[in-house]
Image (tube, grey):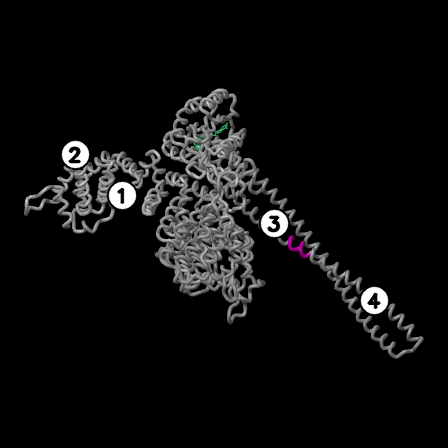
Amino acid sequence: MEFLKSGFKTVLGATETGQQPSAAETVEKLVERVISSTLLDDRRDACRALKALSKKYRIEVGAQGMPALIQILKHDGQDSEVISYALDALCNITAAEEFDEEADNPAVSVNVGEQFTEMFIKVHDHVTLVMGYLEEYDFRVRRAAIKLITTLIANKTRDLQEIILVSPMGVSKLMDLLTDSREVIRNDALLLLIQLTKGNSNIQKIVAFENAFDKIFEIIQSEGCSEGGIVVEDCLILLLNLLKNNSSNQQFFKEGSFIQKLSPMFNITPETEEADWGPQKVSNIHCMLQVVRSLVTPSNQQQVISSCQKVMRKSKILDSLCSILMGSGVPPDILTETINTVAEIVRGDKENQDQFSKVMAPSYPPRPVIVVLLMSMINEKQMLELRCAVLYCFQCYLFRNEESHKAVVETLLPSSEAEGSSHSIGQLLCAGLFSTDSLANWFSAVSLMHGLVDSVPQKEELLRVLLATSGRSRPVTLLEQCTNLLQQDSYKQQSKVGLLMLLCMWLAHCPIAVKTFLSTNGTMAYLTAQISANEHDENEYLIQGLCAFLMGICIQFNDNSLPNQKRNDICQLIIKRIGQETFCNKLSEVSRHESYSRACKQPQIRTKSASDLLLDYEYCKLYKGLEALIAKLVSGFDVDGIELTELTLSSEASALVAQYKGIIRDLDGQINTLQQSSKKLETKNVELEHKLSQIQNLNTQLSDQNTLLKAQIGAVQKGTTTSGDEAAVNALNAAQFQTNLYYAENMRLTQELESLRKRLENEVQLSKTANDELQKLQKDQEDLLELLTDQETKIARYEEQLRTAGCLIENDDDSENNGDTKYNEVALNDNLVAAGLL
Amino acid sequence: MSYAYLFKYIIIGDTGVGKSCLLLQFTDKRFQPVHDLTIGVEFGARMITIDGKQIKLQIWDTAGQEAFRSITRSYYRGAAGALLVYDITRRETFNHLTTWLEDARQHSNSNMVIMLIGNKSDLDSRREVKKEEGEAFAREHGLVFMETSARTAANVEEAFINTAKEIYEKIQEGVFDINNEANGIKIGQQHSPTNPSLPGAGNQAGSASSGCC
Ligand SMILES: Nc1nc2c(ncn2[C@@H]2O[C@H](COP(=O)(O)OP(=O)(O)OP(=O)(O)O)[C@@H](O)[C@H]2O)c(=O)[nH]1
Ligand SMILES: [Mg+2]
């Protein structure tokens, strides 16, 4: 402070002793001097004093001094010192942060820096003026100019970006700063560019065009890559700004072979211990992972994603990341982000998915990395973020890959080789499904669900999965177990949501699964009870919605092969027990729930708390595709089981149509069953024929043997008569005995053959009758259809007549004619009835 | 993919003359019949061969609309080649060439190769600018000239490749300072551990084809 006071004395001359001038007065005098003094030295001193006051008295200096400072910038360009004071002073005035010096000044509001920024940039030339000083080589001037521009951009990003874009070569000039050999300048320039490139794709592209990628990598390498300091992190943040959501730059990055340059940065030696993961290194690696993700994140253009994924495999980035996954002592947040990154590198790329599935963890015994990850996912003690990342990774591994779907389901099937080991993917997921940790239930259900997306064969395979139960005689199927769990009160809401999503995915587009589900005891009763219950909890609403959707799927994908559980039966159940409107209302609960919009947004799993994990991205896609269909289907049924589509027909006519429809539907059903039984008979036929030919073969073989033996006997008999050898007689006896045996066997087989032949004939006959009947029915149906069309034409004609008649009556305004009209109507109805009887 | 050289191009000219279509035809061999206004700048790339050497072209397709002029100006400096395009069926796009050329000359480095292109040669019936006029303009201003059609792909390859040939010749003559990246030229990386020395100018660098990065 002493220094300051003496400073003022030299500037202001001697003040009257004992009377301290107020800050405002001092600033006023200084400003006066800056503006009017003809001596450069004077102006420089006044400027220096203003700068010194600009922290503590920023309002005074800003309000009164800004024009003076701008004037200095305009006219005193040849004196670096005064320029640097002016720039520094402006920088202090516009700073966003509060200075210690002004902490006790109540007049300073939070956004005073922003207000001064606004004042300053109102005239665009002021910014251009400051930009001009970037070209000044003098260290103080250049650095002060960089700082001021950085501050201005930070405060008024949009405005500054526009001003810089239109100022000639503005961005290019800023980019040139990166090549300054003075590290301090270069580092400040990095900070400036980070601010400048935020959310402006035009600027991002120009910066990239100006070889930013090359320059950034040069700096990163010179600073020691991932082991480097904060400058490396700054470089990576800038890189991230340039790549995020900018497909043009992403393509340029890929085409410029820069992905390959990222690769060595992930080479973290395997012997790395915890101690080596300093906070700066953690930040650096974290940023690098985000850079990788910015190239392959699912929201990017598909073409960019696939080409980047390929390069990441070839340049061994995927390999390096997998070894980080396996490394020891990796900090949890790095591990989590690495899992997310691996996830996006493999998503939808068959070769990458395949490579990932083959990575083995260095455990004893060695296990696939996927298995080790899933173990963490179902482990209650693991961090939520990590568990979510594993789920995401597993989903990405399954995404659009029929083979990986198959691999997952296979580990659950009884014949599977992995049966012995208790740590196959399937076993882990089952363990998770039946665990007491509701989050593990949810994670496992969703994981399994992703193995079924768009693959009907796997849905059918999964029906075969049996679970061994302790103390029970019969093993239960996985599907049964799922429905059991659903009905247990101890199974928590979140777990039920997971399970219901799994069931929906399982049954959708898979009539066999629907049938199996419907034939499981109590399922329909449970769903009906759930949907019609009166609940008040938001998550209960969601569960009701999921139940309604599941029931809808049971209608939509019902093949009408179960008596009493056909489409119509379930719709009747809805009409009588729930009500169509209530049903549709409940159905839409799913999309009304807040987790729906969250899950729809992106495949990544973003959540802050475990209880927020409810709906899943793929599930929402399924729901979106089917909801309207189901709602239409259900509300289209009426009490008599008729789909109300012919709203234009009179009630008699539509009843008639409905009658025919009913008949046709029944015939359809019959045809279906007949077709199925005919198919069954055909396969049986083939089987029997096969057996027959086998037996015939055996038969010839046996008779050959028989002949041979007979010949042998003959020979032996001859031998016996000549030599009378005891041994020969014995052999003969034995042979004869054997022959008898063969003979008996032969007889038996011939008989069996005969009976099989008969059975075959029977079956063929049966199949023929079935086919005949089928044809007859088809013919009947055709006739009926014809009749129906005929009826419809007739009805139309009658209606036409009716209408004409009505017209006539209206024209003829005579009350007596009303009777006639009635008569006409009755006659018409009679006609219709007559037609119906036809 | 390894390359001996990398050249940066820009494509400039009035809106609707077919700049984006030319790029798309060159990189993807496709034609886009609807005018998809370019906003700002778009990037494309392709590898070509000249004199047995792999040359990577990185191309920035700029927006022709006046509103983007200040943005597109940022791309002149740092480009080794420019395709200046007009539409032979719209005379005003030809009349604007002088302005474009002034702009380019003012902001680019003096060695930038400019190729003048009269596009939409397939629409001969609607032609408003004679081929001779284009030739004369090019001669007068020291440009290379070609008529192209982004629709039929006629001369499209040639336009991009001939520009590259011009640049390549200038490098051989030593006109370009290839170590200054601001010129829009880069020498291919040679990542062989036995030969860590920096790549020199010209022939030696051109023969490199091993580096994968
Ligand atoms: N017949 C014909 N039409 C063309 C040709 N080239 C472009 N077009 C059409 O001209 C229109 C404009 O083409 P663009 O390539 O989008 O024009 P641009 O120069 O990129 O326009 P801006 O992006 O606004 O600067 C489109 O409808 C094209 O289909 C051509 O060679 N022949
Ligand atoms: Mg365009």
Per the rendered image, the range of residues in magenta is A678-684
Question: Circle 2 sits on which residue?
Answer: A38
Q: Nearer the viewer, mark 3 or mark 4?
A: 4
Which numbered disc, 2 or 3, marks the residue that appears first in the sequence? 2
The residue shown at (24%, 45%) is A95
Callout 4 amino acid: Asn
Asked whether mark 4 and ligand 1 are closer than 8 Å, the reply comes as no
Callout 2 amino acid: Thr
Q: Nearer the viewer, mark 3 or mark 1?
A: 1
Ligand 2 position by quadrant: top left
Graded by Cα atoms within 10 Å as few (under 14), some (14 to 19) or many (20 or more), the crowding at tag 2 reads: few
| Element type where label 4 sits in the image | helix
| Element type where label 3 sits in the image | helix
- State how far apart marks 4 and 1 are (Cα): 116 Å
Q: Position of residue A175 (x, y in %)?
A: 36, 40
| Element type where label 1 sits in the image | helix
- State how far apart marks 2 and 3 are (Cα): 109 Å
Q: Which mark is residue A706?
A: 4
- State how far apart marks 2 and 4 are (Cα): 137 Å
Residue A526 versus residue A170: which sits nearer the camera? A170
